Image (cartoon, rainbow, N blue to C red):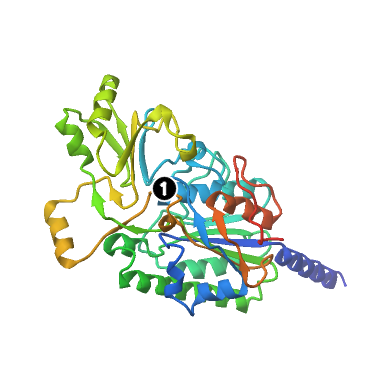
Amino acid sequence: MKAALAALALWLLAVAAAAEPTVILLSFDGVRHDYPARVPNGALARMAREGARAERLVPVFPSSTFPGHVSLATGTYPDKHGIVDNQFLDRARGEFRMGNDASWIEAEPLWAAAERQGVPAAVYFWVGSETDWRGQRVHQRVAPFDARVPEREKVARILGWLDLPPGERPRLVMSYWHGADHEGHLHGPDDASVQAALREQDAELGALLAGLDARKAWSDTTLLVVSDHGMAAVTDEVPLRATLEAAGIRPRIEGGAAVAHLFLDDPAQRERAEAALRGVAGIRVYRGDALPESFRLRFPSRTGDLVVVASPGVALRESPWSERALRVLAGSKRGMHGWAPDDPDMGGILFALGRGVRPGTQLGVVRMIDVAPTVTHLLGIAPPAASEGKPIPGIGE
């Protein structure tokens, strides 16, 4: 009798654990909001049909991988979480080069917020997740980042995590996928290679959906698929360094192709640098301590003395003449991102399926900073401490 009661108690605990809400958040790098139309009958199409889809996901500024992933995780902007680009300079700490050390993040990320509130989390290659954030551990973590790991291994690991016994099974799972970013950069957003890459990603997503189907997981599981930014063709380049050096100024230049931070050894050179760049087509120049508030980018120790912002399509880098000539002869264009969030081509994707999502829901235009509080709303916990977003209407209602 005692053995039977003990078995019943264990079964009830397992049922209760399985009934607790679970959220899986996947990010597809560099998938523009209109890309899914290129894979019309796949897993993303199923998610839109049986769940919800946003018209586009509006990124933060700059619309790049590291600021975007950290904003997705924290629910706030680079001026608060501190990841102001894929690479930057901190005047006190030194260089950040696409690192995954959580100590660079100044706002609480989702996985730490979940664990702090008693929700086990698992993270597979999300930006900034490879170390504990301010001492807060996670139940499961895959590190270090390895770009060679295929999505099928991530699917197998995610499903394996969901099969763990109560107490070990994560209820928040976050994973970075390759998306179509590499192909978009190399060949431009309209190249056939972008469609091929997305088709491969979509097939692996289909495998994950099939695994959730087989486990009858949808009554307590919500799957969210987002991207960090879109992609646009590069139409022009500004010789930023050469322009400054011609004026006798040799600043340290940090940032990306759309936003550059200029650090000057001699602050007195600031006016000369501004004068040298004034009137250059395709760029705007701001003093670091006077960035427009709407940018949400000013982080004093990581913002340059001057900040150069490129217009959409303009890249702040100089390719060798031979490389540019070959691209012209081949009729090819490379792609880039990082430009202003209100440029539709910078918009990403957001799909949702499962618990708390009605089939066929149209979400309209959604802000990136609203993803984290939507995840915590689905989990029944408070959002990350610095989050400024709100739960997305239509998910979890």
Measuring 40% from the left and 68% from the top, which residue is drawn there? 150
Q: Secondary structure at mark 1?
A: loop
Report the residue that reaches farthest toward the left. 322
Q: Residue at x 28, y 24 (%)?
A: 271
Q: Amino acid at mark 1?
A: Ala
Can you see residue 381?
yes
Q: Provide residue 118's location: percent of width, then percent of height.
A: 68, 50
Q: Position of residue 395 (x, y in %)?
A: 66, 61
Q: Which residue is mark 1?
A: 340
The residue positioned farthest toward the top in the image shown: 268
Give the quadrant of residue 149. Answer: bottom left
Please tell me in which quadrant of the rendered image residue 304 appears. Answer: top left
Q: Which percent across, then down, holds residue 273?
A: 25, 28
- Is residue 129 visible in the rendered structure shown here? no
Image check: 152 left or right of 216? left
Judge whether 268 appears above or below 325 on screen: above
Horizontal and vertical percent position of residue 82: 47, 38
Indicate the quadrant containing the N terminus: top left, top right, bottom left or bottom right: bottom right
